[in-house]
Every structure is written in structure tokens, then in C-alpha cells.
Image: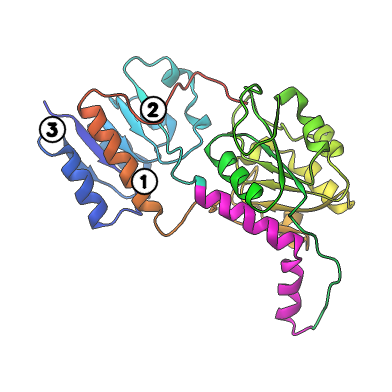
Amino acid sequence: MKPHLLIAIDAFGDTHIEAIAQAVEGWATWERIPETASPAEQLAKLATADIMIGWPEPEWLLPSPIKLLLCPSVGYDEYQVPELITRLGFTFCNGSGIKSEGVAEHCLAMMMALTRRLPQYIRAMQSHRWQQRTRHEELAGATACIVGLGGIGLAVARRCAALGMQVIGVRRHSDRVSDPVQRVYAPQQLREAVAAADHVIATLPGGAATANMFDRDVFEAMKPGGYFYNVGRGDTVDENELVRRLQNGHLAGAGLDVFVEEPLPADSPLWTMENVIVTPHMAGYDADHADRICDLMTTNLRRYRENQPLLNEIDLGRIDP
């Protein structure tokens, strides 16, 4: 009996679906459902599928016969549940690399906007005020500390270095130095690392190992007047402590694409702070986003079909700080 593929990505157009159909032609059957399908419909469809492309809820996978999940997201902490970690014959692949360049450019855009005071100028423009600000900051010569040197972190590092910044980083394997990062600290040296930086960029995955990694002690260790950016996962940050440090002036500003609670609650003080940029967890969504997802998925379908090693295969039992 042929394996059955379930596709649940609304961003795919006809050309993407055609490419996937060609990748499985003669080997597997396939069907498409909307991402917004009801839980009951998704559960019913998953009950007949062997492979899925999409973002199913972890609990929907448990009673299903799914053997391969091709997930377009980089993060995978929500799938680190005991039943999937120990499930025999289950393979999980994430979307690492799909969003790296876009997230890195988004991060640099926030850095430039904050140091050149663009949020304040935009507010002044909306009320037709000619408000000159004499104090701007340069990124050239400043130090960026990138916490999490995966694909996104290294893409940010390359851009920072190209702007003339000194680049340091934090990663679990601190003995691995990757150009253009000049020094790598271990996670237990996080306070020392952030104290040496003008701009601290978090690109960490979520999960137990990184929960509240940026806590009171870490924000206290940051340079007065420093900037903080989060393009990783919201639960890595003690958000209340971040707000307090922004309000008391210890931090000059923050650029945030991810939050503890999403959507960000309407009563969050982050919405109205002049020194904060809020974007709705969309940093990695570029014009060719769907093309990149499709290329990765069709490659992995062909590899799976031919029993070759898969790209971005993840051991759900591993813990990465």
C-alpha cells in the first residue's frame, strides 16, 4: 500500500503543490487541507496519513500513524513530548535554514532603526512635527553578542561583521568558533558575555533548557544603554524584567519579534514604549518564503523515498541551550 501525504500549508500555490506531487508521483498519494481546518477534521485526516507537511498540534500526532513530519518551523520544543521522543519509527525534520537570511535582515533593520531613532521620527512625522534629534549611535565599532549560534545566529553575525561591528557569541559548544565570531562563551558565561556587548541578540530555541535564560541577573549584567533583541523564542526572556529595565533606562531599547504570550496582549507596556520595536513573529516571512519551504520539503520527500539521509532531521530528545 502506498504511503499517504497530508499537506497543510496555506502559503503554497499551484506551482508548489505541483512540485510536491511530482516528488511523490508513483510512490505516494497525497491530499491538501487548510491550516485552519478544525481539530476534528485534522485528526480525521491524520488518521489516514503516513507523512505530513505542516504544523499539527503535538497531541494530534499521538493517535495517528504519522511516520514522518516535515515541519517548516525552526523551533521544535512543542514536539518534545515523551510520546513522540520515544515513538518508534517516527522522524521529525524542521525548517532550519528557510528563515535564516530573512530573520537576520529583520534583526539588522531593528538595530538600525533603534540606533538612528527611527521610531521617534516616525511618531513625529505622523503629527507633522519637525523634531530634530542630535544623538544617534553607530553600529560600526560597537560589539554585538549573539546568543545562539545556529543558522540564524550566524546569519546575524555575518551582517554585523560586515557593518564593522565586533562579534562575540554564546553557544553550548563554546570550543567551536565560526567566522566572523571572534570569541565564543559557554551558556554559564552568559552574564560575562552580555556585559561586553552594546547589542545583545537572542536567537535561541525554546524549551526547558532555555526558559527564562534572560532573567534579572542577565539584564542587570548588560551594559547601561545597551540594546536587546529577541528573534528566537519568547519564553527565553523574563518579559517583566525586560520591561522594568527599559522603563528605568538601564536599557536604551529593544527590538522584539517573539513574546511569552502571542499575540502580545493589548495591555502590554511594550506596545507604547518609544524605545521598543514590536513585530508580530513575522521576521522570517519573505516574498520567497513558500518557495524555500517547498524546495526543502520536496528534497526531503525524495530522500525519504530513496532511503537517503534527511535534511534537518532532529532528535527530539536532545536539549540545546
Q: Which amino acid does label 2 sit on?
A: Phe
Name the foreground residue: 110 vs 174. Answer: 174
SS at circle 3: loop
**Residue depicted at 59% across the width and 40% down the height:** 153
CA separation, marks 1 and 3? 21 Å
Q: To which residue does mark 1 refer?
A: 293
Q: How far apart are marks 3 and 2 (CA)?
A: 20 Å
Quadrant where the C terminus is found in the figure:
top right
Q: What residue type is labelled 3?
A: Trp
Relative to the observer, which residue lies in front, 312 or 158? 158
Magenta stretch in the rendered image: 101-129
**Residue for badge 3:** 27
Circle nearer the N terminus (3, 2):
3
Residue corresponding to mark 2: 92
Relative image position of residue 193 (x, y in whole percent)? 77, 33
Spot occupied by residue 31 in the image (x, y as percentages of width and height)? 21, 43
